Amino acid sequence: MNNFALGKYMPLNSPIHRMDPRAKIMAMLIVLIAIFFPAGFLGYAIIAACAVAVVLIAKLSLNFVWRSMKPMLFMLLFLLIVNILVLRTGAPLVTILGFTIYSDAVFQTLYIAIRLMLMIVITTVLTATTKPLDLTLGIEDLLQPFQRFHLPSHEIAMMISIALRFIPTLIEETQRIMRAQASRGVDLKEGKLKEKIMAVLSLIVPLFVSAFQRAEELANAMEARGYCPGRTRTRYKILKMEGRDYLLLAGSAALLGTMLVLWLA
């Protein structure tokens, strides 16, 4: 949980931090679409190089981004095992104890792993370089055209922003409960499987209670400040696109076009 970086805002002074949140959100969506194009390892290498360049321009440490991917390693290992057991196509690579591992199982696992890692990097850069309030304003503006279909754009943007904002808070709360239970003799690391399940259940219940208490406190605070969903609201901060924002969108569109060309080729 210490490695979980998604949702953490890093207050740095970089060109990426100063960009319009709408441009960053649209660029993220465009790059996520590009990631799902089967452009081969060359295409993924190009996206990875662009992602690393954006991380360096944003003055984020590569170690910070790598920490955000560590919690996914267990799931990637699980996918590798499942693909090895299920996929029986391609060239046989190696035989272990009479069981043959085929090339398609390894390559498909690599494709999934690379896609997940790139998605995590792009999303981490967005949340680390955008304030929660700016993220809310950006999502609300992007959903504004859907208000013609009675879509509550402001409420959706508010929920997404609150969810991202409280991810680090819930992780800290989980660690606090784990330390409190460890001081009372609860062992979450050792013991039989049944004992571990019971220990996890004893962790989940107080975590849910704490989450509901925080939600109630937040609701009371919003009501005390006069927040009313559905009402027309004014803004202190007005978003305005600049040249660097359009440059970011153009670069994202060029990256998407490159993936499309590689896929067709």
Image (cartoon, rainbow, N blue to C red):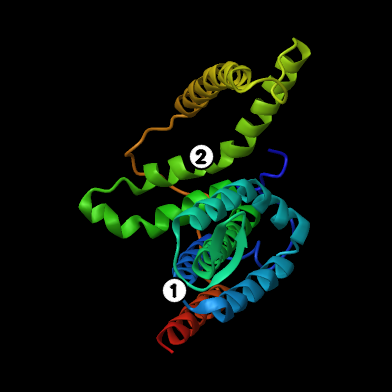
Residue 80 percent location from the top left of the image: 56, 55
Residue annotated with mark 2 = 163
Mark linked to residue 5:
none
Could you tell me which residue is drawn at 23 percent across and 48 percent down?
A: 150
Residue 24 percent location from the top left of the image: 54, 64
The quarter of the picture where the N terminus appears is top right
Asked if residue 262 can be seen in this view, the reply is yes
Q: Residue furthest front?
A: 98
Q: Considering depth in this image, is 166 or 20 the residue closer to the camera?
A: 166
Q: CA distance from mark 2 to mark 1?
A: 29 Å
Of circles 2 and 1, the one toward us is 1
Task: Check disc 1 and give the amino acid type.
Answer: Phe
Could you tell me which residue is drawn at 55 percent across and 52 percent down?
A: 81
Task: Please tell me in which quadrant of the rendered image residue 242 appears.
Answer: bottom right
Residue 236 percent location from the top left of the image: 52, 49
Nearer-N-terminus badge (2/1): 1
In this rendering, the answer to whether 12 lies above or below 259 is above
Image-based side of 231 in relation to 27, left or right: left
Q: Considering depth in this image, is 185 or 30 the residue closer to the camera?
A: 185
Q: Considering depth in this image, is 150 or 201 the residue closer to the camera?
A: 201
Q: Residue furthest left?
A: 149
Q: Secondary structure at mark 1?
A: loop
Mark linked to residue 37:
1
Badge 1 density bin: few <14, some 14–19, many ≥20, Cα 10 Å? some
Badge 2 density bin: few <14, some 14–19, many ≥20, Cα 10 Å? few
Task: Please tell me in which quadrant of the rendered image residue 93 appears.
Answer: bottom right
Task: Check disc 2 and give the amino acid type.
Answer: Ala
